């Protein structure tokens, strides 16, 4: 029973490039959450999605960031025109419907040079 | 606005003793609280949770206490083991929505 999968684990991008982070939730889980952890800080909520729907994007920066969870395939967090301040660990979590507990993936560490 | 606070950035405890990690929150609407453990370069791992209708929940060596009037929860680990050395995050949610995390407490258990 595979856990939450994220890839890539490490991603290096130059300023101005695009970053695409992928997340496959646990089997049977229909809720996906994205969090970001800056160095020496806690995890900050970014966006909450269900299949084909964005439920809550109150934590997403207004520009350059977008997320989707299509009917088929993984959830994608997309960051356009990356800047050095985007360097962080990005974690995806999933949960079954109606459950408060969330299961986290190993994270993608994005470095912007 | 930090709704969930862990005021102790680090804690050092001898093996076999009790570890007590604390967490305070400000939003009285929170109805579910969780503790996660995190090793470097890994994702958070769920440890234990508690609903706001309870004041205590136990799972093996881990016990979480909730004091709603004080808006305070704590995690007790007894006995502490070297493998417990990690960063511990307190988190809270409302209506099974997003998790709001504290900044974490680094626990070190020494022999």
Image (tube, coloured by chain):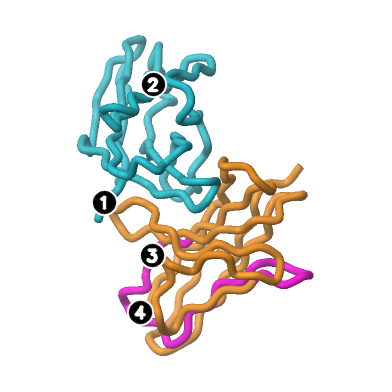
Chain colours: A orange, B cyan
Which chain letter matches label 4? A
* Mark 3 or 1: the one toward you: 1
Which chain letter matches label 1? B
Quadrant assignment, res A102: top right
Residues at badges 3 and 1 in contact (C-beta under 8 Å)? no
Identify which residue is drawn at 32% across, 19% down.
B19
Question: Helix, strand or loop at disc 2?
Answer: strand
Q: Which residue is mark 2?
A: B65
> What is the spatial separation of the Cα atoms under label 1 and label 4, in whole angstroms?
30 Å
Give yes or no for residue A77 being in the magenta stretch: yes
Q: x, y percentage for residue A41?
A: 30, 53
Q: Which residue is mark 3?
A: A88
Q: Which residue is mark 1?
A: B2
Work out whether mark 4 precedes mark 3 in sequence or the reverse, and give the earlier one.
3
Q: Which residue is mark 4?
A: A113
> What is the spatial separation of the Cα atoms under label 3 and label 2, in whole angstroms?
32 Å
Q: Is residue A101 left or right of residue A87?
A: right
Compared with A11, B25 (above or below) is above
> What is the spatial separation of the Cα atoms under label 4 and label 3, in whole angstroms?
12 Å
Q: Are marks 2 and 4 on the same chain?
A: no
Q: Which residues are magenta?
A: A69-90
Which chain letter matches label 2? B
Q: x, y percentage for residue B95?
A: 52, 46
Q: x, y percentage for residue A98?
A: 65, 45
* Mark 4 or 3: the one toward you: 3
Compared with B67, A111 (above or below) is below
Q: Is residue A108 left or right of residue A53?
A: left
């Amino acid at each position: 029973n595979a856990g939450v999968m994220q890839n890539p684990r490490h991603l290096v991008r130059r300023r101005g490039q695009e970053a695409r982070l992928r997340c496959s939730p646990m089997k049977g889980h229909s809720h996906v959450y994205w969090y970001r952890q800056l160095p020496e800080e806690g995890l900050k909520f970014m966006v909450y999605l269900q299949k084909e729907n964005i439920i809550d994007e109150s934590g997403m920066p207004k520009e350059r960031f977008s997320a989707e969870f299509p009917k088929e395939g993984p959830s994608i967090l997309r960051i356009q025109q990356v800047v050095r301040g985007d360097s962080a660990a990005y974690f995806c979590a999933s949960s079954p419907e109606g459950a408060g507990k969330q299961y986290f993936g190993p994270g993608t560490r994005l470095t912007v040079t | 606005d930090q709704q969930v606070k862990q005021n102790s950035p680090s804690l050092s405890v001898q093996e076999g003793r009790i570890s007590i990690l604390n967490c305070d929150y400000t939003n009285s609407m929170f109805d579910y609280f969780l503790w996660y453990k995190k090793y470097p370069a890994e994702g958070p791992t769920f440890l234990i949770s508690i609903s706001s209708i309870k004041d205590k929940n136990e799972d093996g060596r881990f016990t979480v206490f909730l004091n709603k009037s004080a808006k305070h929860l704590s995690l007790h680990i007894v006995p502490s083991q070297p493998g417990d050395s990690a960063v511990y995050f307190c988190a809270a949610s409302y209506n099974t929505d997003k998790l709001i995390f504290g900044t974490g407490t680094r626990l070190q258990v020494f022999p």
